[in-house]
Image (cartoon, grey):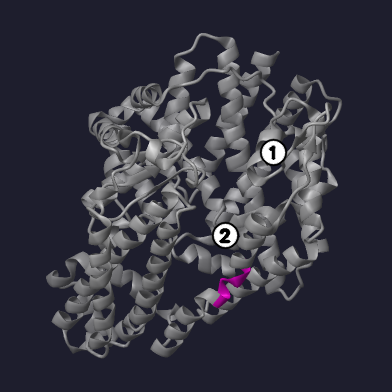
Amino acid sequence: MKRNELKTEDTWRLEDLFLSLDDWENACKDLEERILKIPDFYGTLGQGVDSLYAYLSFQSDTEQLLERIYIYANLKYHEDTKNADSQKLTDRADYFMTAYNQADAFFVPELLSIPDEKLVQWVHMPVLADYEGYLLEIMRKKEHMLSKTEEELLAGVYEIANTPSTVFSMFDNADLKFPDVVKKDGTKLPLTHSTYMVYMKDEDQNIRRQAFQGLYHTYQAFENTLASLYAANVKQELFYAKTRKYGSSLEKALDSSQIPVSVYDNLIEMVEKHLKPMYKYMDIRRNALGLSKLHMYDIYVPFVKEREDTYTFDEAKQIVLEALKPMGEEYVGILEEGLSNRWIDCYENEGKRSGAYSWGAYGTHPYVLLNFQGRLNDVFTLAHEMGHAIHTYYSNQNQSYQNAGYKIFVAEVASTCNEALLMHYLLEHTNSEEKKACLVNYYLEQFRTTLFRQTMFAEFEQITHGKLQEGEALTAQNLKQIYHELNVKYYGPDVVIDDEIDMEWARIPHFYTPFYVYQYATGYSAAIALSSKILTEGAAAAKNYVDGFLKGGCSKTPLELLKNAGVDMSSKEPVEAALRVFEELVDKMGNLKG
């Protein structure tokens, strides 16, 4: 289907960002003029609190304008990535982003050159009330900040430092070609990134094996190049950590959200202590599939016959609305507004960006991209992305621009909490043992791929970054060995850890944003704990979650915000509690299959 064939009501309303492309162009002219004015502020910040306020206000207005321009351009591009005009919009938006960052690079060094005593006094003055948290966070990081010249230099070399990620993305998405999968009747099936997981869920083990081997043998043919790219990215991260005076790359990555390294360590420790239920789950899978041995290409295929239920988008919306009623009337009201007033771009069209996401600019409602196909998974995706959207909506409505953007550490909590509430609703509203087994299988896979698999990824990063910091080279051979040993540990002695899986590290794009993936696992654990509280404690728990967490933005640290909602992620308990839920689900699945 082409873009112009979609019904207007099934597309997002970008007019809420800019009424027309002409308005966007006028905003770009305004932004360009504002960027050119930034040098006028150089050397003025220390002249008095009013001078500091003048730039902070100018900075805030400029960043909000840039945000709208950037997001509009990318949303237009994602509607149809083949559209050359939309590609030009994103190129211009990228240019403005770089130009602004370079011009604004003076701000932090000049701010921190103001004597501490004077700056502390100014920060607490009423005129800077909206900027207090923002400024205190910069002051907290003072020991990691550089001079104006050095900050400008680092801003200017960002694209060069990002080369490993850029090269990997181009290689992986544009250049890499995989061999066809051949069916028994000789029919050739194209193997691509998007079809790979389709084949991994195929009932025919031969198709799964071919896809698995074809994919990883292709990566293996370039193992030394890919190892060099990965190592280069680890090196650049270590360079930035040392340059900014952090003890390690991990410490630097976690500091932006004020997360202690102990939280990262606790996650790995607790998951490793609770691996026996995973081994049991793998054994249930092996038996259910009727296999004498379970290979790595057998771990994604559903072992419960999936129901072929399909849902219209209206049906999906109604199910999600019902499932999220425990969140209270206000929350459901915002959800209804988003579902009814074109926050969402619903259906796939030719050239549209794949996948799903939520994104938005301060001062406007969030937007959600979907590629709705009517499957059960699409219903969960709708709940997930609207969780992101409502989190953003609450933060923007209740916080200043500087305090609205919640940290990545908590970014997956609201979305996953919605999914958990949806799962509870679906399990409660079916009497079919077959459907219950299907839902439990789906839930178990969410745990396996999010809590267990992402923790394994996190441990891989911890090991490899640590080795480089200790002066050990990262080669294809030792990267494969590390990854193989982790798979043995996480999946257990009764799963055949095929040699091909040793190359999986080479195809994970998130590894080029170091120490990001652990947050999927911690966020999942927090969400399971929060959804359990909402379901057992009712309206009071939902209110604490909304008022103490969703409305908080980044006005407090992520750990403080989660504590407001009743979850202490500095302790081991939330991760352990989530792992207990997994164990209960494994037992339930064993009974259903037994």
**Segment tinted magenta in the rendering:** 160-164
**Which amino acid does the dot numbered 2 rest on?**
Phe
In the image, residue 590 sits, relative to residue 154, either above or below, namely above
Q: Residue at x 73, y 52 (%)?
A: 177
Image x and y of residue 145, in percent: 42, 80
Image x and y of residue 482, in percent: 77, 57
Q: Residue at x 78, y 53 (%)?
A: 218
Is 589 within the magenta? no
Q: For mark 2, does the 10 Å Cα neighbourhood hold few (<14), some (14 to 19), or many (20 or more) residues? A: many
In the image, residue 498 sits, relative to residue 156, either above or below, namely above
Looking at the image, can residue 529 be seen? Answer: no
Q: Secondary structure beneath disc 2?
A: loop
Which residue is label 2 attached to?
A: 515
Which residue is label 1 attached to?
A: 275
Would you say the residues marked 1 and 2 are in contact, meaning their CB atoms lie under 8 Å apart? no
Q: Which secondary structure type mostly characterizes the magenta part of the structure?
A: helix
Q: Secondary structure beneath disc 1?
A: loop
Image x and y of residue 158, in percent: 51, 76
In the image, residue 299 sits, relative to residue 133, either above or below, namely above
CA gap, disc 1 and disc 2: 22 Å
**Which amino acid does the dot numbered 1 rest on?**
Leu
Q: Residue at x 49, y 52 (%)?
A: 82
* Residue nearest the viewer, comparing 272 with 112: 112
Image x and y of residue 91, in percent: 43, 66
